[in-house]
Image (cartoon, rainbow, N blue to C red):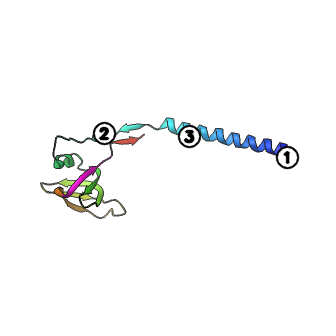
Amino acid sequence: MKKAYQVALMAAVAMLIVAACGVFSMTAQARSVTAVEGAKFDTGSSLKDNLIIYVGKDAVIDLRSGKSFQGYIKTVGDHLIHIEKLAGGRDFYDALIRIEDINAIETKFRDMK
């Protein structure tokens, strides 16, 4: 009886392994990386011009102070940028940032489909 139990247990483990491999392979095959339409940086242009490309889109703005703001770029002026719907549970908050204080812009260039 002990041997029959061991054989049944090994068969059950083998079936679980086969089922898990099937699920993982189907998930991997169904998804692929695609480029986000309109996502680009222009290294030949100013920071302001690059920000204008992302008006209405989600971006992370890294400041020289080390602080970051994530939200939707609403408007870009000569010296200021207005970000709305801030991330981190601050959907009802906006930020006004001086362009000269910006150290980097982070945006999504690729997506899983």
Badge 2 element: loop
Q: Which mark is residue 37?
A: 2
Q: Position of residue 26 (x, y in %)?
A: 54, 37
Q: Which residues are magenta?
A: 101-108
Q: Is residue 37 above or below residue 84?
A: above
Q: Are marks 3 and 2 in contact (CB under 8 Å)?
A: no
Which is more N-terminal, label 1 or label 3? 1
Q: Secondary structure at mark 1?
A: helix
Distance in Å between CA atoms under marks 1 and 2:
61 Å
Is 41 left, or right, of 14 in this rendering? left
Extreme residue toward the top, this view? 29
| Residue 105 in the image, given as x and y percentages of width and height | 26, 50
The answer to whether mark 3 and mark 1 are in CB contact below 8 A is: no
Circle 1: residue type: Lys
Out of 91 and 17, give the one closest to the viewer.
Answer: 17
Which amino acid, by three-letter code, is at mark 3?
Answer: Phe
| Residue count near mark 3 (Cα–Cα under 10 Å), binned few <14, some 14–19, many ≥20 | few
Q: Is 51 within the magenta?
A: no
Type of the residue with mark 2: Glu
Task: Give the quadrant of the C terminus.
Answer: top left
Considering the whole magenta stretch, tell me its main secondary structure: strand
Can you say whether 37 is above or below 95 in the image? Answer: above
Residue drawn 75% across and 42% down? 10
Q: On residue 2, which mark appears?
A: 1
Q: Which residue sits at x=14%, y=54%?
A: 77
Disc 3 versus disc 2: distance between alpha carbons?
28 Å
> Which label lies toward us, 3 or 1?
1
State the mark number for residue 44. none
Pointer 3 residue: 24
Nearer the camera: disc 3 or disc 2: 3
Q: Position of residue 9 (x, y in %)?
A: 76, 45
Residue lying at 31% horizontally and 64% vertically, measured from the top left: 92
